[in-house]
């Protein structure tokens, strides 16, 4: 069997199996990438659920404990109204003493919604018309209503501290007396402080850069002494507002310091608690997992997998090639000579004719007196002669030929792109070499030679017509005395 055939088959099997193996590796790669992304989303979703649950819990707790605080704030507000009836000049009020007495900050807001007096000195001069127009509109409405009102959990405008605020308009409608009750030192706040939850989640998840909770106005809830943004950044404000307005999650992905950072905004609204700050938006900023770094952690695993697959593929290719190469080879080749068999030859020849692969010449070669070899010297010697004849035919046919053994002592050759003169030359060379190679049989009185019939294909020829033409030419060679060639001539 042709070793080249086995080598080619091994290469084909190896390539095919390696291709399948690479598909598996790529599939594993994509699966790993998808799992990494899914794990990141799971972490972010878990953080989102925890912070929303924390906000909901603290709102529910404050809603339960809010009744008594609201009553105390209303009672003290009425006390201040009585004082206003006696003395409407707030500049003479001892607001510091009143703060100590009530345990609450006191703010006096005029009709322009500006803080004109306060026990909290830093807020004096704060004009809500300038900083917070929506809130300023609400203050004006509360002033006109002329009744006591209060919010639930809310924040101090400048500090971000959590407080409860109440509002009592003066009878003349000129001022609002605002009280602020500090909440962060209360046990329930310490037990259910969502700021602690955000800090813990940030520490537990290296992919999370920050978790912030903002009011619907974009003001940060919680401690502002850190490096957190007091307001939502202008570059993200549009996404923030859209999330709150449509009450749907929104995301914005940006590049920061060479890393991909995604800002997710989750709107939240307390079910029962009142107050502007009970409408909130949670911002979770998280880094996309740099897949290259994840892949690096699996590098050794992938390298081992690829090496193992390659080795196994090589071994299987060699084993399978050995197992199937002979059956496959024999399906297309003559077992004795190694030339193509009739079926394989005709398949290829038909294809050559279909492709019109240049001018084609067809040759039939028959061993003369071969039966005498088998009868006199035995089939073993006959087989040796057939093998030697096949080698001579292959060698003398030169390039661009297709040779086959189609019967016991009959061979065929199909040439491509040769002239008539070149085909005649090849036939002469075959005859000459055969005479020299089998001259030793003369002493056995066996005149072994070959007869050749040649047909040159025209455009209308098929394999059937070529066989017929070459066979007629072969008959002429035999008729003329053998050991020669004849070229088909339609006139004969």
Image (cartoon, rainbow, N blue to C red):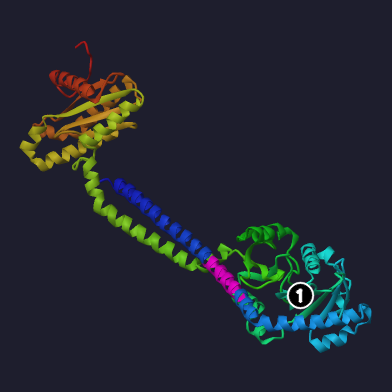
Q: Is residue 362 above or below residue 164?
A: above
For the residue pair 472 and 138, the one nearer the viewer reads as: 138
Locate residue 296, reporting x and y percent: 54, 66
Could you say whether the residue bearing mark 1 is in a helix, strand or loop? loop
Relative to 304, 374 lies left or right: left
For this orientation, the residue located farthest to the top is 491
Q: Quadrant location of the C terminus?
A: top left
Q: Residues within 10 Å of mark 1 (few under 14, many from 20)?
A: many
Locate residue 78, reporting x and y percent: 80, 81
Residue for point 80% across, 62% down? 133
Relative to 230, 11 lies left or right: left
Quadrant of the image occupied by residue 218:
bottom right
Q: Which residue is mark 1?
A: 148
Relative to 228, 392 lies left or right: left
Quadrant of the image occupied by residue 258:
bottom right
For this orientation, the residue located farthest to the bottom is 101
């Amino acid at each position: 069997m042709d070793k080249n055939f086995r080598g080619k088959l091994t290469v084909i099997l190896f390539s095919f199996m390696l291709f399948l193996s690479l598909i598996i590796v790529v599939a594993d790669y994509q699966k790993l990438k998808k799992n990494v992304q899914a794990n990141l989303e799971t972490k972010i979703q878990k953080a989102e659920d925890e912070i929303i649950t924390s906000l909901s819990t603290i709102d529910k707790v404050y809603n339960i404990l809010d009744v008594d605080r609201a009553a105390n704030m209303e009672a003290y507000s009425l006390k201040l109204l009585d004082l206003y009836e006696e003395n409407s000049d707030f500049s003479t009020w001892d607001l510091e003493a009143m703060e100590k007495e009530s345990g609450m900050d006191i703010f006096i807001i005029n009709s322009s919604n500006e803080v004109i007096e306060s026990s909290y000195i830093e807020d004096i001069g704060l004009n809500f018309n300038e900083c917070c127009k929506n809130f300023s509109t609400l203050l004006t409405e509360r002033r006109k209503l002329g009744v006591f009102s209060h919010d639930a959990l809310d924040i101090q405008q400048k500090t971000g501290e959590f407080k409860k605020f109440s509002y009592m308009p003066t009878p003349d409608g000129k001022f609002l007396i605002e009280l602020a009750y500090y909440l962060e030192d209360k046990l329930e706040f310490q037990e259910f402080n969502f700021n602690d939850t955000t800090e813990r989640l940030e520490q537990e998840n290296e992919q999370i850069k920050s978790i912030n909770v903002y009011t619907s106005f974009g003001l940060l809830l919680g401690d502002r002494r850190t490096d957190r943004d007091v307001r939502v950044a202008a570059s993200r404000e549009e996404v923030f507002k859209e999330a709150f307005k449509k009450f749907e999650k929104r995301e914005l992905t940006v590049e920061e310091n060479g890393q991909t950072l995604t800002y997710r905004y989750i709107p939240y609204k307390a079910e029962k608690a009142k107050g502007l700050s009970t409408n909130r938006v949670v911002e979770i900023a998280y880094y996309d997992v740099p897949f290259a770094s994840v892949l690096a952690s699996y590098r050794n695993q992938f390298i081992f997998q690829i090496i193992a697959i390659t080795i196994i593929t090589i071994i299987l290719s060699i084993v399978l090639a050995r197992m199937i190469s002979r059956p496959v080879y024999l399906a297309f080749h003559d077992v004795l000579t190694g030339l193509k068999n009739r079926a394989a030859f005709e398949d290829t020849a038909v294809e050559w004719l279909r492709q019109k692969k240049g001018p084609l010449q067809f040759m039939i070669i028959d061993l003369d007196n071969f039966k005498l070899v088998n009868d006199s010297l035995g089939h073993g010697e006959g087989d040796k002669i057939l093998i030697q004849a096949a080698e001579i035919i292959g060698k003398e046919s030169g390039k661009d030929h297709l040779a086959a053994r189609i019967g016991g002592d009959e061979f065929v050759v199909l040439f491509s792109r040769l002239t008539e003169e070149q085909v005649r030359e090849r036939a002469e060379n075959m005859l000459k070499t055969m005479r020299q190679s089998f001259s030793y049989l003369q002493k056995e009185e066996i005149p072994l030679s070959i007869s050749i019939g040649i047909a040159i294909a025209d455009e209308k020829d098929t394999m059937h017509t070529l066989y017929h033409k070459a066979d007629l030419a072969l008959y002429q060679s035999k008729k003329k005395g053998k050991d020669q060639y004849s070229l088909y001539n339609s006139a004969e």
